[in-house]
Amino acid sequence: SIVVLIINFMFASLLTTLVGQKSYMWGDNAEQIEAWFGSMGKTMQTLLSIMTLSGWDHVAGVLAEVIPGTVVGFSIMLYILMCFFTVLSLVTGIVNNSFTLAQKNEDQKRMVAMEDHRAIFAKALEEMFMSSDQSKSGYLSRPEYESALESHPAVLAQMKKLDMETNIDELLKLFDRLSQDSPCNGAVKIDTLVDAMVHLNCMATSTEVFDVKYLLAALRRESQGQLSSMRQEAAAHHKDALTKSSTQVAEMRGEGAPGGARNGA
């Protein structure tokens, strides 16, 4: 990695300057020192060999002839440890990244499979509720909804498989929340029920989502109703104003007619 190259470059610069350029100090081993540390390229090659623990003891023995053995041993140990932990962190990062990607792919596959199961479950729920809709209006009353749940216990088991832990009481509370804004005397549209049950206990709290959703729907209908009544009131005021204007014009014409007749006479 780049970090290992930087470490090698730093040590190579020091060794080439402090050892390679002073190879004469080693007397009979001067040629050997020159071969090991005579240039940056030779020094980096020597360091790579030491990093792999190949011949490091021979290099240390020759260097110890001039440099104190303690300094040589500590320096080589420091270099090897730095390289070891750098490579170890690199390998660990690669392994962790591989595991993270594998986990991410697995989660994506699981989410896709879960969505497919939800779609199948939604279709089955819709068919069940349609068969329970005695009025065939597309809406379910609370007794019809409760009866459908009690007669099909497999619904709760299927919801549990989809990571939706619930019971009939909680589903009835969900129905009550949805029916608060229903235009059909407390009955709830089947599509709305299916949508709410399929997304129950999803990543966000679905109850809050649906509460906000139907609150917005109620506010929209309320604003539309207020706008409609304002329009009706404005139309009524306009009609009254026209009527009053017409009456006043007629009165003014009636008052002016006799005067005109007298002037003519």
Image: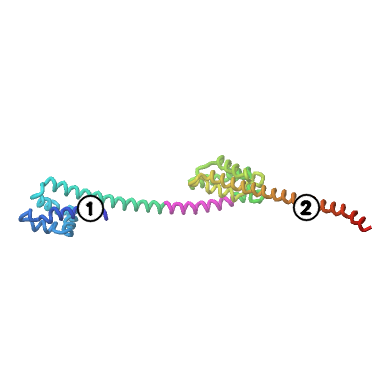
Residue drawn at x 41%, y 52% is 106
Residue 170 rendering spot, x and y as whole percentages? 55, 41
Residue drawn at x 11%, y 51% is 63
Start-end of magenta stretch: 107-128
The residue to which callout 1 is attached is 7
Tell me, for residue 242, which label it has, or none.
2
Q: CA distance from mark 2 to mark 1?
A: 94 Å
Label 2: which secondary element: helix
Answer left or right for 96 relative to 123.
left
* Residues packed near mark 2 inside 10 Å, few (<14), some (14 to 19) or many (20 plus): few
Disc 2 versus disc 1: nearer the observer: 2
Residue drawn at x 64%, y 51% is 138
In the picture as drawn, the residue positioned furthest to the right comes out as 265
By secondary structure, the bulk of the magenta-drawn segment is best described as: helix
In the picture as drawn, the residue positioned furthest to the left comes out as 28
Dot 2 amino acid type: Leu
